[in-house]
């Protein structure tokens, strides 16, 4: 009797874990589709408005999207192999360093030569809507990752945070340029400060992922 009860509980637990995994996959896929669609939208804006800044944003969002895709593929291939998933986390952490370098160079050129341009209200609304969406998703993932032990969810959380940070920076820079109500020097100072903060935070999350992954890999 106890054996049947234990088997039933084990089966229910297994089914629950499977459903959560499927739900997580669909959430990541949905986020990935939105991410890549917005990357293409930035490419479109870059081409139509001859904006180098939006071209750079396209590359940044594309890289983040590919990182999500890589994490999802490895998650599905090695769903029970913690070592492989921590290796993915370490790789993503290293890629974050390169993202910081690319972002820093892009921001330096953009701020120095004023490569960003003013845009229409519709474009501003679309940027604001996407930024609002990414901030909400980042907060939700932050809460979920703290409650969950899922390694991939932790990695995706950090990718979403990096995406939300740059989205906020993108919104700030385009808003200042489109609705210019302050002195140019003040706007430049605000953009420089915000850019430094965003780069430092992404750098921090990269280091954090490498430290966490290396620490667990030594135990496995």
Image: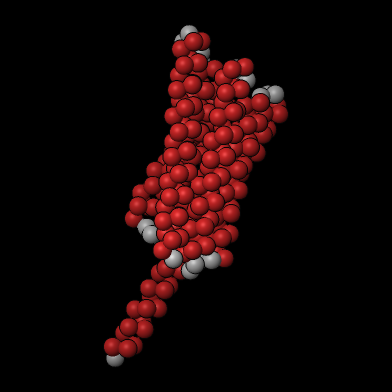
> x%, y% of residue 62?
62, 42
Judge from the rendering whether residue 105 lies leftward or rightward of residue 27; answer left or right. right
Q: Residue at x 52, y 23 (%)?
A: 173
Q: How is the image coloured?
A: secondary structure
Residue at the image point whose x is 58% and y is 59% from the top: 73
Q: Nearer the viewer, residue 136 or 96?
A: 96
Residue 18 higher or lower than 96, as above or below: below
Q: Residue furthest top?
A: 183
Q: Nearer the viewer, residue 180 or 95?
A: 95
Residue 3 vs 79, above or below: the answer is below
Instruction: Judge whether residue 183 can be spotted in this image.
Output: yes
Picture quarter with the N terminus: bottom left
User: Considering depth in this image, is 127 or 105 the residue closer to the camera?
Assistant: 105
Number of numbered callouts drawn: 0
- The residue at 45%/33% (across/down) is 200
The answer to whether residue 44 is left or right of residue 161 is right
Q: Which quadrant holds residue 71?
A: bottom right
Rendering coords of residue 198 (x, y %): 46, 32
- Residue at (60, 43) in percent of width and height: 63
Q: Residue furthest left?
A: 2
What percent of the width, then of the height, locates residue 100?
54, 35
């Amino acid at each position: 009797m106890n054996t049947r009860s234990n088997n039933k509980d084990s089966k229910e637990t297994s089914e629950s874990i499977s459903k959560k995994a499927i739900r997580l996959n669909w959430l990541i896929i949905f986020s990935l589709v939105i991410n890549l669609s917005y990357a293409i939208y930035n490419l479109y804006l870059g081409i139509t408005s001859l904006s180098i800044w939006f071209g750079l944003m396209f590359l940044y969002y594309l890289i983040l999207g590919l990182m999500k895709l890589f994490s999802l593929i490895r998650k599905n291939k090695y769903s029970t192999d913690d070592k492989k998933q921590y290796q993915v986390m370490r790789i993503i952490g290293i890629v974050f360093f390169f993202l910081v370098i690319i972002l820093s160079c892009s921001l330096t050129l953009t701020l120095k030569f004023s490569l960003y341009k003013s845009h229409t209200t519709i474009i501003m609304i679309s940027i604001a809507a996407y930024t609002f969406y990414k901030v909400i998703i980042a907060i939700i993932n932050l809460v979920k990752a703290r409650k969950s032990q899922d390694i991939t969810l932790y990695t995706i959380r950090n990718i979403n945070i990096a995406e939300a940070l740059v989205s906020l920076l993108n919104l700030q820079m385009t808003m200042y340029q489109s609705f210019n109500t302050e002195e140019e020097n003040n706007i430049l100072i605000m953009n420089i400060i915000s850019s430094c903060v965003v780069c430092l935070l992404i750098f921090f999350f990269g280091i954090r992922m490498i430290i966490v992954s290396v620490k667990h890999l030594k135990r496995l």
